[in-house]
Every structure is written in C-alpha cells, then in structure tokens.
Image (cartoon, coloured by chain):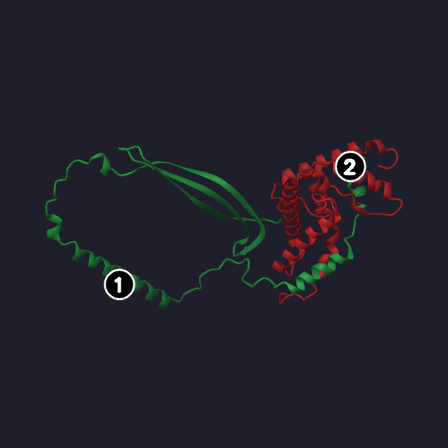
Chain colours: A red, B green
Amino acid sequence: MNERAPADAWKTCYRELAPRLLLFARQWVPGAADAEDVVQTAFVKFWRRQPDAQREHYPLLYAAVRSSALDLLRGTERRVRREAEPAVTVLREDATFFDCTVEQREDAALIEAALRELPAEQREVLVLRIWGGLTFAEIAATLGASINTVASRHRYALEALRRQLKPYAHERF
Amino acid sequence: MNDSDLENQLRALSPAAPSAGLAARIGRDLATAPAAAPTAGVIARPARTTFALRWLRDLGWAGAGAAAMLAGVMFFSPAEKLAPRPVSAPPVADEQSYEPAGTSRELVSVKDSDELIETEDGPVREVRYTYLERLAWAHPGTGARLEIELPREDVFLLPVSLQ
C-alpha cells in the first residue's frame, strides 16, 4: 500500500460506498454476484491508483464501476452469442435493489420495478444522484456527459417514475 | 407529488448491502496485489538542467553543425558543381516513378481511459484513437498500383473537471 495511507484505509471508503456502488453496478448487471464482481474489480483497481482517496475522487470510483460493468457485459454478450442463448437469460437475475423494513417492502418493490423500466441513461443518472449522492457536475464527469444533459436525464427519469407510480399514488406516493 | 417529495421518497430506501465476502475478497486483493508504482499515472518530464550543462550541450550541437557544414563544402567542390550535366534521354514509361494516388484513414477504435492521470496542469483523461491508414501509388505508364496499410494511433489528454 501507499506510505501515505494505512493499510486498511480502504475499509472506511468501502463501508461508506459499497452498497451504493453495488446498486450502481446492478443497473447494468442485475445479477447480484456479477455486480459484486464488478465492484470488486473496480474498487481494487481504483484503490491501487488512489490509496489516499478523498470525497472528490469518488466520481472516479463510480466511473470505474461503470467501466467494469460494461466490460463484463461485453464479455457476457460475447459468451452468450457463442453459446447461442438469449442474452436476457444471463442479464436477468432477481434480487432486490434495496434493504428495507417490512413497511417499506411494497414501496421498494414498486420503485425497483419502475426503475427497471427506465432507459439506462436515465436510470444511471437517477441512481448516482439519489443514492450515490453525487452532484450534477460530478455525475457529468463520471459519465462523460454535459451537466445540462445529466440534469435533463434526471428530470425525465423523475417524470417517468412519477408516471409509473401514479396508479399507486393515492395509497403510497 | 413534486420532484423534491419523490426524491425524498426514493432516498428513504437504502441500497442493499453487499455480501460479507466482498469486503474480504477486496481486502485479499489489495493485500496480495502489488501497489501501483509511485510513477504510475504520472507523465515523465525531463529533469531540469543547469545553465552550464545547457551551455555545454548547445556548444556541442553548434560544433557538430559546423563540422557537418565543412564536410559538405569539401565534398561538393565548385569544379564539380560547374561541370555540365550529361543530357539524358527523355524518360520512357518504364523509368517513370510511382505517383501518389490517394490516401484514406479508417477509424478503428476509440479507447477512453477511465483512469485519471495527474499532470502539472491538473487531472487529465487519456483518449486513444486508432486508425488504419491506406496509402496508394500508381505508375502513370503501366497503370500498376501499389498500396500499403499502416496502423496509426493518436493519443489525446483531455482535461477533466470534477467541479
């Protein structure tokens, strides 16, 4: 490890970010096990580069997760093509996105279903903003898009979610 | 429900925690894998030279240049320069040289690195453009055509702003 940081300094960062990184990874690789592999690869790679990472470096970690997830997807798609199986059988794996209380369970299921219906570019912005806690500028840097684009995608995502959750609005939302 | 209410509703849900094994795997990887070298991700820059070293270096180059010029003057004597050139026969088709017939460039891949490189001017991201260049020559007399393909890679360092 780097001399500037203690050997287990990564644990603080990991404890803070691991659930968020996992949720972000699962936007591309819904399988929990694959998503954990993605987070592992990205986190190790990131921490070797930034052993004294601070809050301002976190967008790079999300970018590393995104890159690893897309690499895994590309590899998976190649493998699926070779085996002549439909990609959906590999990409779909049911596991909840959220840890929730009994009272939250139904809301969480509705929100997760609505999230899965969003276009990928809107969903990743929403996840980074809501659960990643990143600013629009940080999300823009993570995704390599402009701030205006990111803000628009966020707005569209919220509108789409509201539309999908509207039938349940009188009960919960 | 407005945007803010919906966002708060969403934030109330906590992302699922990873399995306990993930932390152990990361810890094992970080413990066993070699850390990045201190120079990793840093663009190497030449060391600063002192005035005396620069002066000696420049003097050496000036001396080499003067020697080359003197050798050239001695080799191409004036008598040789003034000697009449033999009149050559008009070129026939076989002796004509190939002429450029066109070039093209095909973009093969763009690799946008997700790693940050620290420079004196701030963090930058590396983007590599890989091309396949095709150069063609044609012989005007015979119509023969010669083509070669060359790989080409352009590397750009794009400034990254995290704010």
Compared with B162, B58 (above or below) is below
Q: Name the residue under label 1.
A: B63
- The amino acid marked with disc number 2 is Ala
The quadrant the N terminus of chain A occupies is: bottom right
Residue closer to the observer: A113 or A73: A73
Label number found at residue A114: 2
Query: Which residue: 13% across, 49% down?
Result: B81
Q: Distance between the residues labelled 1 and 2?
A: 77 Å
Query: Do discs 1 and 2 share a chain?
Result: no
Residue closer to the observer: A26 or A6: A26
Query: Which residue: 63% across, 45% down?
Result: A75
- Residue B121, image x, y percentages: 52, 54
- Residue A100, image x, y percentages: 84, 47
Does residue B3 appear to the left or right of A63 in the view shown?
right
Q: Nearer the viewer, mark 1 or mark 2?
A: 2
- Residue B117, image x, y percentages: 55, 54
- The amino acid marked with disc number 1 is Gly
Specify few, some or many for label 2: CA neighbours under 10 Å numbering under 14, 14-19, or 20 or more.
some
Label number found at residue A23: none
Residue A10, picture quadrant: bottom right
Compared with B73, B7 (above or below) is above
Helix, strand or loop status at disc 2: helix
Does residue A56 appear to the left or right of A112 in the view shown?
left
* Chain of the residue on which disc 2 is drawn: A
Residue A74, picture quadrant: top right
Residue A21 appears anywhere in the view: no
Does residue A67 appear to the left or right of B73 in the view shown?
right
Residue A97 appears anywhere in the view: yes
The quadrant the C terminus of chain A occupies is: top right
Query: Which residue: 65% across, 61% down?
Result: A52
* Chain of the residue on which disc 1 is drawn: B
